[in-house]
């Protein structure tokens, strides 16, 4: 479970829009348009979060390939993306 999912579960809220931070640029992007990659590299270690956020599909694919990641559906996304790479050991 990633950081946003934990927050939504704890708060019990269902916001109309969720903004996430694109890792390469630091810009806020709509979660429905984000490309999320879960990898073996921590995204936010204090929270135990391994889900990385990208505005660019190409950046997400690069991260997935380099760090054994797989795509995750974004909160609020209309469709789910199929895994690009499976983490090692799966």
Image (cartoon, rainbow, N blue to C red):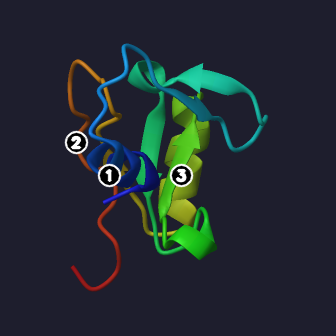
Q: Secondary structure at mark 3?
A: strand
Label at residue 33 = none
Residue at point 27%, 48% (across, down): 9
Sequence order check: which comes first, mark 1 or mark 2? 1
In the image, which is nearer the foreground, mark 1 or mark 2? 1
Residue ID for mark 1: 10
Q: Position of residue 46 (x, y in %)?
A: 61, 74
Judge the density around disc 1: few (<14), some (14-19), many (≥20) Cα neighbours within 10 Å: few
The span from disc 1 to disc 3 (Cα, nearest Å) is: 21 Å
Q: Secondary structure at mark 2?
A: loop
Sequence order check: which comes first, mark 1 or mark 3? 1
Q: Position of residue 53 (x, y in %)?
A: 55, 42
Residue at point 59%, 62% (across, down): 43
Label at residue 52 = 3
Q: Quadrant of the C terminus?
A: bottom left
Q: Quadrant of the N terminus?
A: bottom left
Q: Position of residue 85 (x, y in %)?
A: 34, 59
Taking 78 as reference, is 13 above or below it? below
Residue ID for mark 2: 82
The span from disc 2 to disc 3 (Cα, nearest Å) is: 16 Å
The reply, left or right, for residue 60 in relation to residue 78 is right
Judge the density around disc 2: few (<14), some (14-19), many (≥20) Cα neighbours within 10 Å: few
Furthest-bottom residue in view?
89
């Amino acid at each position: 479970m990633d950081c946003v999912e934990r927050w939504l579960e704890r708060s019990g809220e269902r916001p109309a829009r969720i903004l996430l931070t694109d890792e390469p640029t630091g810009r806020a992007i709509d979660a429905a348009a984000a490309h999320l990659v879960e990898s073996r590299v921590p995204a936010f270690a204090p929270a135990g979060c391994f889900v990385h956020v990208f505005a660019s599909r190409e950046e997400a694919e690069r991260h997935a390939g380099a760090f054994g990641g797989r795509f995750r559906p974004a909160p609020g996304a209309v469709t789910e993306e199929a895994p690009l790479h499976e983490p090692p050991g799966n």
